[in-house]
Image: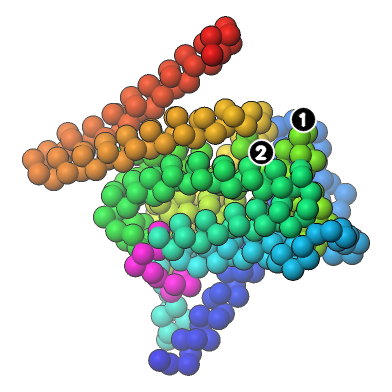
């Protein structure tokens, strides 16, 4: 294999890491300004013009902040846990296609680090590793509140990982492939969110729970657990947990845009290949805003209801959605009738409506004391 291939691979990996690290820094500014606008206040506006240097100020503060390591912690695991949490958030993006390819000095350069035939399996396997860092951080801290945060995180991950895996299965069935490039190309005529809006919504909810974002931020519920699994962390070790959460937000929005919103596809991409990353960036910005909007408007769910929602509502609904999608595609292919194909979104929305009615009835029953 040509040595230039390895040089290209290293350069692309470095650029991708730089994009994610820069994106993490300015996502914090984006979130703070968006929340401030929703809550009718100013937000960061002192460090640099329009507060643009605020992420740099935060980084400097965390770098020079004194780090405390409690005396009774399990030091090796305590130090490795933040690293184990942040690395998967970087590695996940390796298989996400940012575009097709372009010519550079006579060489064809692809806009992805790796094109893996089982890219979805790669994403699912790597994404499930990050929870170990959180669990080990809580255990190694030798603190009951941190330990409870770690246990909550593992239980939450198990509950919502099943629904997340089934929503991945929806994209696999619609794209007839586990390769992310094939899934994107299958959406040239129509995004998968049009065919399966409920599957996209389940993916969205499950990923919010996976990255511990509000209203699923129970592992770090400060009212109950005084910050949860990272209670004993400070300085750069805390910054790594902070970095992992925001980088996973970016990567998950990239994955959702790829699976359900056409990825890098858009007008003029076939002619101007460098437009692909621009379209993907725009979709990620919109999806990130939706995450921020949810945080600004939804209160934290009580822990027992969070677990109940994952097992009693989201898991059965995701099973129904996969069954409806597979059956609709099979019948449309066998009978050569698109009516079966377009029954997929209709039946899925009806199933989601039934789930909403079940939740409403259950909450009404509990509010009247009939538990």
Indicate whether 233 appears above or below 323. below
Q: In which quarter of the image is residue 304?
A: top right
Where in the figure is residue 44, as x and y percent of width and height?
82, 45
Which label number is shown at residue 40?
1
Task: Using the rendered image of the protein, determine whether residue 345 is visible from the camera's viewpoint.
Answer: yes
Which label number is shown at residue 71?
none
Decide if residue 181 is on the left or right side of residue 284.
left
Residue 181 among those drawn in magenta = no
Q: Quadrant of residue 1?
A: bottom left
Where in the figure is residue 223, as x and y percent of width and height?
78, 33
Decide if residue 115 is on the left or right side of residue 35.
left
Decide if residue 44 is on the left or right side of residue 313.
right
Task: Using the rendered image of the protein, determine whether residue 54 is visible from the camera's viewpoint.
Answer: no
Please name whichever residue, 115 or 304, is drawn nearer the observer in this view of the structure: 304
Where in the figure is residue 42, as x and y percent of width and height?
81, 37
Q: Is mark 1 on a helix, strand or loop?
A: loop
- Quadrant occupied by the C terminus: top right
- For the residues carrying marks 1 and 2, which lies nearer the camera in this image? 2
Q: Name the residue under label 2.
A: 218
What residue is at 54 percent from the left and 76 percent from the top? 12
């Amino acid at each position: 294999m040509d040595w230039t291939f390895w040089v290209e691979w290293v350069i692309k990996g470095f650029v991708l890491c730089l994009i994610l690290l820069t994106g993490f820094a300015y996502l914090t500014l984006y979130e703070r300004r968006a929340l401030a606008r929703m809550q009718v206040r100013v937000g960061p506006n002192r460090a640099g013009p329009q507060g643009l240097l605020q992420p740099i100020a935060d980084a400097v503060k965390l770098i020079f902040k004194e780090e405390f390591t409690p005396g009774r912690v399990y030091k090796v695991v305590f130090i490795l846990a933040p690293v184990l949490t942040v690395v998967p958030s970087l590695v996940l993006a390796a298989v996400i296609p940012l575009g097709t390819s372009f010519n550079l000095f006579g060489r064809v350069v692809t806009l992805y680090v790796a094109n893996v035939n089982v890219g979805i399996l790669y994403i699912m396997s790597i994404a499930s590793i990050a929870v170990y860092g959180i669990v080990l951080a809580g255990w190694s801290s030798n603190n009951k509140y941190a330990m409870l945060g770690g246990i909550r995180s593992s239980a939450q991950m198990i509950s919502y990982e099943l629904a997340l895996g089934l929503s991945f299965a929806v994209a696999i069935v619609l794209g007839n492939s586990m390769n992310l490039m094939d899934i994107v190309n299958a959406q040239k005529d129509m995004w998968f969110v049009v065919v399966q809006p409920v599957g996209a919504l389940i993916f969205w909810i499950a990923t919010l729970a996976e990255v511990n974002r509000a209203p699923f931020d129970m592992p770090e519920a400060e009212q109950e657990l005084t910050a949860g699994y990272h209670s004993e962390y400070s300085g750069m070790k805390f910054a790594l947990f902070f970095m992992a959460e925001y980088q996973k937000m970016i990567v998950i929005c990239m994955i959702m845009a790829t699976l359900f919103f056409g990825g890098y596809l858009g007008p003029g991409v076939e002619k101007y290949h460098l437009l692909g990353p621009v379209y993907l960036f725009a979709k990620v910005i919109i999806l990130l805003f939706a995450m921020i909007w949810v945080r600004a408007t939804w209160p934290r769910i009580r822990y027992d209801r969070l677990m109940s929602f994952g097992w009693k509502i989201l898991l059965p609904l995701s099973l129904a959605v996969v069954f409806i999608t597979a059956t609709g595609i099979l019948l449309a292919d066998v009978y050569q009738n698109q009516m079966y194909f377009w029954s997929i979104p209709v039946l899925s929305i009806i199933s989601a409506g039934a789930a909403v009615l079940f939740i409403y009835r259950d909450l009404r029953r509990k509010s009247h004391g009939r538990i």
